[in-house]
Amino acid sequence: MSQINLLIFGDVVGKLGRKALAKKLPELKARYSPHLTIANAENLAHGRGLTESTLNELVEAGVDAFTSGQHVWENQQGAPLLSDEQWSKHLIRPGNVDPLLPGNSAMTFVVLGKPVTIANLQGRLFMSQESSSPFLSFDRIWQELSSDQAKPMVIIDFHAEATSEKQAFGHYVDGRASLVYGTHTHVPTADAKILPQGTAYCTDIGMVGLTDSVIGFEKNSSIKRFLEETTAPYELLSSGQAEVNGLAISLDIDSNRVLSLEQIREFVDI
Ligand SMILES: [Fe+2]
Ligand SMILES: [Fe+2]
């Protein structure tokens, strides 16, 4: 039996998040032997969007592919990379948003001769960016892939705020996608499981970033925003304890079904 191993990380927040992932990745790769390592890059460059140098930092650390979310367009330097010929092969953004925005919403890698498609969709509840139905968008992705391949292996990064929307989405695609994992909240949920029809699911796999923080940002700068109802900028710290949250999954190459599923929650001092 051949299996495809994936190592997946949620939103990597700023420099501390990048350093934490780089420091922890060799050990995690030795433990899980991933064929592909994926991370969400929407908060890579000082918490807002990404740049070429911050992406390269993670590529050098061993990340192969990047998903993202609504913040990905916020860095003026980084947004054009979404349509760059090279980067767009392994950097995607949610597909169910304004179609005029740059970027691809899915990427396919051939692993051990098998195409593995990773797609990015965004939720609609409590999100600042308007989007069309992620449910119907998935149907379209599934239909397109099914017309090309007998049994497509599909992984979805569902970037969403509401746990209810994420759970409903997981059940909606159960038996079709091999894995649905949530990103965006930066807080891991302890619910990695296999749904009744075989799809692996986790509501949110959590972030890679500062532990003593508010979703990776300096806690007092966040409290100030709530207390004074301002939009003062979030601050980031460059040292401290970081948490590295993610998911390790092994999938059967023939059936696309889950062989093992494990949540990762590690801590590292930066
Ligand atoms: Fe995020
Ligand atoms: Fe987000």
Image (cartoon, rainbow, N blue to C red):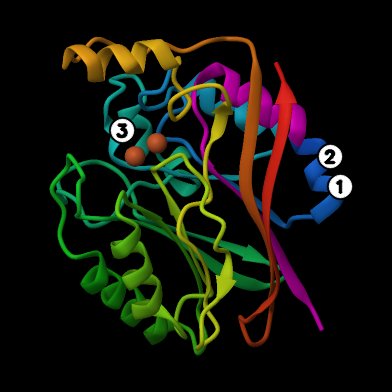
> Mark 1 sits on what residue?
30
Q: Where's residue 62, x and y in %? A: 70, 37
Q: Is residue 141 left or right of residue 241?
A: left
Residues at marks 3 and 2 touching, judged by CB atoms closer than 8 Å: no
Q: Earlier in the sequence, mark 3 or mark 2?
A: 2
Secondary structure at numbered mark 3: helix
Tell me the amino acid under the disc marked 1: Ala
Q: Residue at x 36, y 27 (%)?
A: 49
Q: Residue at x 52, y 47 (%)?
A: 188
> Mark 2 sits on what residue?
27
Residue 71 is labelled as 3
Calculate the distance from the C-alpha at mark 1 to the C-alpha at mark 2: 5 Å
Residues at marks 1 and 2 touching, judged by CB atoms closer than 8 Å: yes
The question of residue 10 being in magenta is answered with yes
Disc 3 residue: CB within 8 Å of ligand 2? yes
Q: Nearer the viewer, residue 213 or 259?
A: 213
